[in-house]
Amino acid sequence: MSSDSDESFSELREAVRSLCSTFSAEYWRRLDEERAYPEEFVRALTRAGWLSALIPEEYGGSGLGITEASVILEEVNRSGGNSGACHAQMYIMGTLLRHGSPEQKQRYLPAIASGALRLQSFAVTEPTTGSDTTRLKTTAVRRGDRYVVNGQKVWTSRVQHSDLMLLLARTTPITEIKKKSHGLSVFLVDLRTTGSKSVTLRPIRNMPNHETNELFIDNLEVPAENLIGEEGRGFSYILDGMNAERILIAAECVGDGRWFLKKASAYARERVVFDRPIGQNQGVQFPIARAYVNVEAADLMRFKAASLFDRGASCGAQANMSKLLAADASWEAANVCLQTHGGFGFAHEYDVERKFRETRLYQIAPISTNLILAYIAEHVLGLPRSY
Ligand SMILES: Cc1cc2nc3c(=O)[nH]c(=O)nc-3n(C[C@H](O)[C@H](O)[C@H](O)COP(=O)(O)OP(=O)(O)OC[C@H]3O[C@@H](n4cnc5c(N)ncnc54)[C@H](O)[C@@H]3O)c2cc1C
């Protein structure tokens, strides 16, 4: 199957497009205005089975690869929607699938696949340590058959619309570890049973319409059976899932880029100023053409990374490069689209400024552009670590 062209996976694309077409631009615009969560859309995507694409068939999912999963999210963003409301279910689930015990998988995966449970939330980032994840300070201390968690997280997204949350916490004090990536553990927290006293939320109003929060964790008790894999190895488990995350976000950016370029080209053809379509001017059409070239190039790297991932080959460099190229390309396309629309680009009803805010996020989250460049410099080019 050809995997590097826009026409690939046409049946899958058509099916996702058809679902997305029932959620109009007005739907997304209204949610943006109300700062509301796309509950109806996420339900429909779950019911259709698209969010469980990566769950193996034996657990009720469709057992597809990251390539197909990336096409699903690309189509959501390309239709004018925003996968950020639910994409994490796809990549968080990988940690449970790869490192969870048979009991944990049996208990949670079929319920996640059917939509009975949502695993949408991933609590890693902390306010005082940011990108320096291995220094995180939230602690989980074993007391008999449970761990007691204390600390603070920030930017924990979708927690208000999730039943389960994956949490990274320190189980060995930083002074007692030999390697800085040791001593962190991953827990599956059942948010339905945590009391409101042990986890306090403070929603963060932010640039896109993204449900994200600060979490204050105070003596949260997590049953020891909810530890995923071995104690102290959590950071490596999380890293395992990051390549999937990078590839999926890259595909969303490709989808955004294609939405912006379609919108920019249509407007440039239709808008007449000085008795000619503005798109007849090279100053208008060349930036659109250049942005198109960059989105197409980023898409190639996204499919290359996805194909390596699906073959089980090492893909850290390609996954990171695809995220960087696609985030840059979608951001360029967003700027070009806004510029092409002149003043109307700023009007809410054109949706350009909304998508512009949404795609800007991917220069920073889930990993900032600088940190990707640092990875490539150090791990691919053999340059000295810069930080
Ligand atoms: C809307 C939103 C949703 C998010 N959702 C989640 C979520 O669900 N779960 C979660 O855990 N996190 C989430 N995040 C957090 C996100 O992953 C972090 O914002 C991101 O990793 C960057 O960390 P930081 O914000 O602390 O920036 P910092 O680490 O403080 O970095 C600030 C700036 O300095 C640069 N910088 C830092 N160190 C270096 C260096 N050594 N060399 C060069 N440049 C450097 C960075 O590139 C960045 O531009 C979300 C963030 C946002 C904005």
Image (cartoon, rainbow, N blue to C red):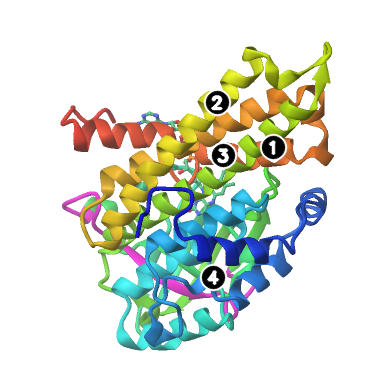
Residue positioned 66% across, 36% down in the render: 356
Query: Mark 3 and mark 4: span between their CA atoms?
Result: 22 Å
Q: Nearer the viewer, mark 2 or mark 3?
A: 2
**Residue 300 showing in the rendered view:** yes
Q: Magenta part of the protein: which range? A: 176-198
190 in relation to 121, above or below: below
Question: Which residue does the numbered mark 2 point to in the structure image?
Answer: 289
Residue positioned 69% across, 17% down in the render: 280
Q: Quadrant of residue 44?
A: bottom right
**Residue 197 showing in the rendered view:** no
Q: Nearer the viewer, mark 1 or mark 4?
A: 1
- The residue nearer to you, when weighing 369 against 122, is 369
Cβ–Cβ under 8 Å for marks 1 and 4: no
Q: Nearer the viewer, mark 2 or mark 4?
A: 2
Callout 3 amino acid: Gly
Which callout, 1 or 4, points at the residue further toward the start of the chain? 4
Question: Which residue does the numbered mark 1 point to in the structure image?
Answer: 263
Callout 1 amino acid: Lys
Cβ–Cβ under 8 Å for marks 2 and 4: no
Question: Which residue does the numbered mark 4 point to in the structure image?
Answer: 50
Callout 2 amino acid: Ala
Question: Residue 174: where, in percent of width, then height?
Answer: 28, 52
Question: Residue 165: where, in percent of width, then height?
Answer: 51, 69
Q: Nearer the viewer, mark 3 or mark 1?
A: 1
Question: Which residue does the numbered mark 3 point to in the structure image?
Answer: 257
Cβ–Cβ under 8 Å for marks 1 and 2: no
Which callout, 2 or 4, points at the residue further toward the start of the chain? 4
Query: Mark 2 and mark 3: span between their CA atoms?
Result: 12 Å
